[in-house]
Image (cartoon, coloured by chain):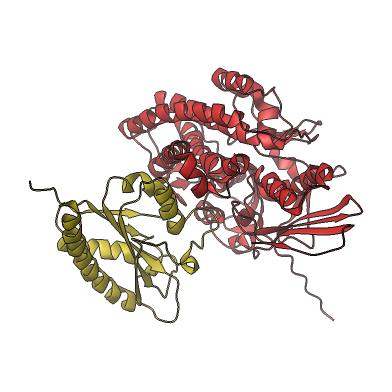
Amino acid sequence: MPTETTAPPEKRTIRVDNLARVEGEGALDLTISGGRVIAAHLNIFEPARLFEAFLRGRGYMETPDIVARICGICPIAYQMSAVHAIENAFGVTVGGQLRALRRLIYCGEWIESHALHVVMLHAPDFLGYPDAIAMARDHGDRVREGLALKKTGNEILRCLGGREIHPVNVRPGGFYRIPQRAELAPIAESLKAARDRAIALVRWVADFPFPDFERDYEFVALRHPHEYPFNEGRIVSNRGIDIDIAQYESEFEERQVAHSTALHSLIKRRGAYLCGPLARYALNFDRLPAVARELAAEAGLGPACKNPFRSIVVRAIEIVFACEEALRIIAAYEPPDASAAPIEPRARIGFGSTEAPRGMCWHRYAFAADGTIKAARIVPPTAQNQPSIEADLMAVTIPLVAESDEFIRSRCEQSIRNHDPCISCSTHFLNLSVHRI
Amino acid sequence: MRLPPPRVLVIALGNPDRGDDGVGLVVAQCLRELLPSDVQIISASGDALSLIPTWADFDAIICIDAAAPANAPGRIHRFDLTAAGLPSKLAVASSHALGLAEAIALARALQEAPRQIIVYAVEGACFAAGAPITADVTAAAVDVARRVAADVDWLRQEQATVNV
């Protein structure tokens, strides 16, 4: 519930105690003094999750199922980053149809996560409703279409992952069970309808009223030689970063801040950056299929979009891409002989980085010779985006200082939702210091 | 004219691999022997939004789920939501998805909610991975199955009256 603090006109504090329609529990504090915005804090107060700590001592085969629990919306991102890191450490490359099935399950996650965010969580902001339930009374057909889109994504997850929330079928080397062609046929039919729904969704959201606002972000995303990125690629930025994922820690650092149980990620010596749909789109526009690029042009987007409010359009375009890609994979699918590549543990460090719906997810694991995890580091997308979200809040508010607190509060909440933050995923760290005297 | 029996859907929510969270699925197992064959029973693992399109085809639904411990393992709560929503204190604890309460409200906004909705919640004691269902909750499951069967009888009579 929002609360108001009574203060002299020259100093106003605008506070939202519990952010609605984001994944997890966070709050916002904004301080305006003398007509200037002097502080904008995204307070994340979810308890630390401690995943990195309790992964220590667990076996590599357990890892995908443990990290899936970090997030109910994007478990595939955590599973995929983990299995790639494990395979990277143990010198295994998964190719062919198993690799294609991994892209297919990722398509499912993008479809269900983006559909939920675009229609149920973000669209109400632009149409003036407090939530999707109120919006459904006037835009019932749009909500039904959104639910149908989400259902298609869920179907892919259920088929390949065993169930739609916290899937259980992903393992290092591939899958425990692979589908037959006949199992994918009804999903292809569902995807054809979903593609049409996604195209209609792009056209709907493209007409929303968008604030005239841009920021000069440093975009960071994976980039692959041929594909719009899911599981593989180099980490690139629009200001010259182009590194192997193993070099992530040489360019990026995490810092603790007092107002957040989630770490803030920064580019060393430069500061905030943005990952997620806007970054993927700007850095991989040429990797999108023609239908997605044409839709982007129709929606008024160029090859890069720096208006975070228009991220809703980019997400809808990514749903179209995911439907297209899923259909392409299913059309070419032949069940492989084995459901997983053989894998033998060894004492190594491995890295994995994949594109969660809301941005890049980076993992590093150090393994003992028997495949037991000695150390783990997981950098989720929301931790990376927090500094940029706070910079957005400052920039969005500056021209609005004369507006009412309620108007500013509403615009700030919308600004946070532009980035679909997954607060629960980001609160993964607790720094414990032991002083011995 | 003889009207077809009202369409009743029983939805068992839960995870069979997390101890008492699987109580709904145990109830569903018991109900397969207790309910008429034209009453559909489905299980779901948690995404309540995905249930909405299914609900539209039914006149009444009965949901069975586990509830958080509150010092009385096996205690059964029954909510008749025909004219109300779930109590706000029972709203979803998940930070990642819309829960049953929100799904019911959304279905009603879309005018796709069944006319009658009953929710059973059984207080659990142990939700550990791989744990069996505890004895108190197992006993409660049998009782819930009996009560759901009685509800189905009542709903079918009630609906028949409404239909006539």
Q: Colour of chain B?
A: yellow
Q: Is residue A345 above or below residue A100?
A: below
Q: Nearer the viewer, residue A241 or A250?
A: A241
Placement of A39 over or under A356, stated as above or below: below
The answer to which quarter of the image holds residue A423 is: bottom right
Residue B144, x across and y down, in percent = 27, 70
Residue at 46% of width from left, 24% of height from top?
A328
Count of numbered tags = 0
A328 relative position to A347: left or right: left
The letter of the red chain is: A
Q: Along the horizontal axis of the image, is A157 left or right of A255?
A: left
Above or below, comparing residue A281 to residue B91 in the picture: above
Nearer to the camera, A205 or A229:
A205
Can residue A193 be seen in this snapshot?
yes
Question: Residue A334 placed where, x, y %?
Answer: 38, 27
Spot occupied by residue B59 in the image (x, y as percentages of width and height): 26, 51
Q: Is residue A384 left or right of residue A84?
A: right
At horizontal 54% and vertical 19% (from top left) the residue drawn is A291
Can see residue A163? no
